[in-house]
Amino acid sequence: MPAQRAPRPPLIHNEAVTIIDNAVYVDGRRILEPQSVLQTSECMEETGGMAWLGLYRPSQEDMKDIAVEFGLHPLAVEDAVTAHQRPKLERYDSTLFTVLRPARYIDSTETVEFGELHIFTGPDFVVTIRHAETQGVAAVRKRLEDNPELLSMGPEAVLYALLDKVVDDYSPVVAGLENDIDEIEDQLFAGDSTVSRRIYELTREVIQFQRAIQPLPDMMEVLERGFTKYQVNVELQRNLRDVRDHVASVIARVNSFREILQNALTLDGTLTANRMNEVTLAQNEQVKKISGWAAIFFAPSIVAGIYGMNFREMPELEWAFGYPLAVCMMVALAALLYLIFKKKGWM
């Protein structure tokens, strides 16, 4: 029977906890929980079991003993410590080094958060290193411990389960991005001034998402090529192919998001230009009206200004009908200009 898991202190202390969980499994069942890396190695020799260490943001110093005990390649250890790696799959002798980029959708901020998970799988050990706050590895460990038959298939089963978990967790992210894109379509036609920024932010998230998932098909292909050589269980092979199909589906949907966002950005530019044109046209109409009325009032003021100069040699000033004539001229000029502007659509 598997040993009962009791609360215990973290195994290694630094500024932050490094080793989160450390266990040795025999036939898929947790039998021991060593308190140090050296003890883990001794337990493996005594029982012939598989070790699984879970670490959180270890330092170079933290990894020193682990690298020695499990024969980890220095280049892979350096990558695991520094993080900021793209998804990849590399083999160092009998050890496989895998980098995955888990993701989760945060509803409160409508953003996507990306993590980083490094996995060392050897003939009889697994070392998982996470560089994010997500608890995905713990969930996978519980799932496998609840299914000893699967866990008894060895380190390959752990790698499969972690791949499966990471890819499954992409589904809520895809759904969240899809919902955000739907909201953008509503914002576009509502004339929201912030939509351009939102499109840019979403496009950046989609590009990051693509970088996280695009390498996965090639990684899965490399794993498949090693099925026969490393005698991977047939059922496990089927499960890995199912994960590959899921990956292909996610990639197709995310690629469509990129196209939709590019089209949305183009449409936003078009709608913005149209709105600016409408504003310009409206302003032009207002300018026409103002100019027309200014011209109408300006014409009578010319007549009034001329006759208001009161020069002595102005015969019209002495006429009995001089005043009515001047008023009629002003009205006639104003009326004529009004009719001309009205015909041209300025009024």
Image (tube, rainbow, N blue to C red):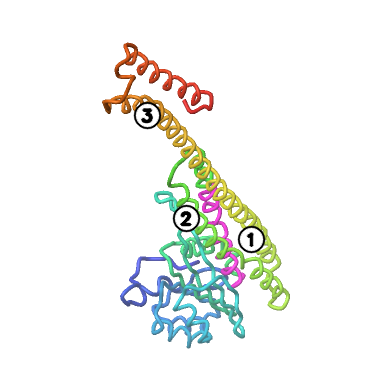
State yes or no: residue 202 in magenta.
no
Along the viewing direction, whichever of 155 and 14 lies nearer the viewer: 14
Residue 131, x across and y down, in percent: 44, 70
**Mark 3 closeness class: few <14, some 14–19, many ≥20 residues within 10 Å:** some
Work out whether mark 1 precedes mark 3 in sequence or the reverse, and give the earlier one.
1
Which residue is painted at 59% across and 84% down in the image?
A: 92
Along the viewing direction, whichever of 18 and 180 lies nearer the viewer: 180
Secondary structure type for disc 1: helix
* Alpha carbon separation for disc pair 2 and 3: 55 Å
Work out whether mark 2 precedes mark 3 in sequence or the reverse, and give the earlier one.
2
Name, please, the residue furthest toward the right.
228
Residue type for callout 1: Val
Tell me which corner region of the image, top left, top right, bottom left or bottom right, holds residue 296. Answer: top left
Please name the residue that numbered disc 3 is placed on.
298
Along the viewing direction, whichever of 188 and 143 lies nearer the viewer: 188
Left or right of 150? Residue 286 is left
Secondary structure type for disc 3: helix
Which residue is painted at 40% across and 31% down in the image?
A: 290
Tell me if label 2 and label 3 are in contact, CB under 8 Å.
Answer: no
Q: Which residues are magenta?
A: 153-178
Residue type for callout 2: Glu
User: For residue 201, which numbered disc appears in the image?
Assistant: 2
Tell me which corner region of the image, top left, top right, bottom left or bottom right, holds residue 64. Answer: bottom left
Tell me if label 2 and label 1 are in contact, CB under 8 Å.
Answer: no
The image shows a total of numbered marks equal to 3
**Mark 2 closeness class: few <14, some 14–19, many ≥20 residues within 10 Å:** few
Of discs 2 and 1, which sits in the foreground?
2
The secondary structure making up most of the magenta span is helix
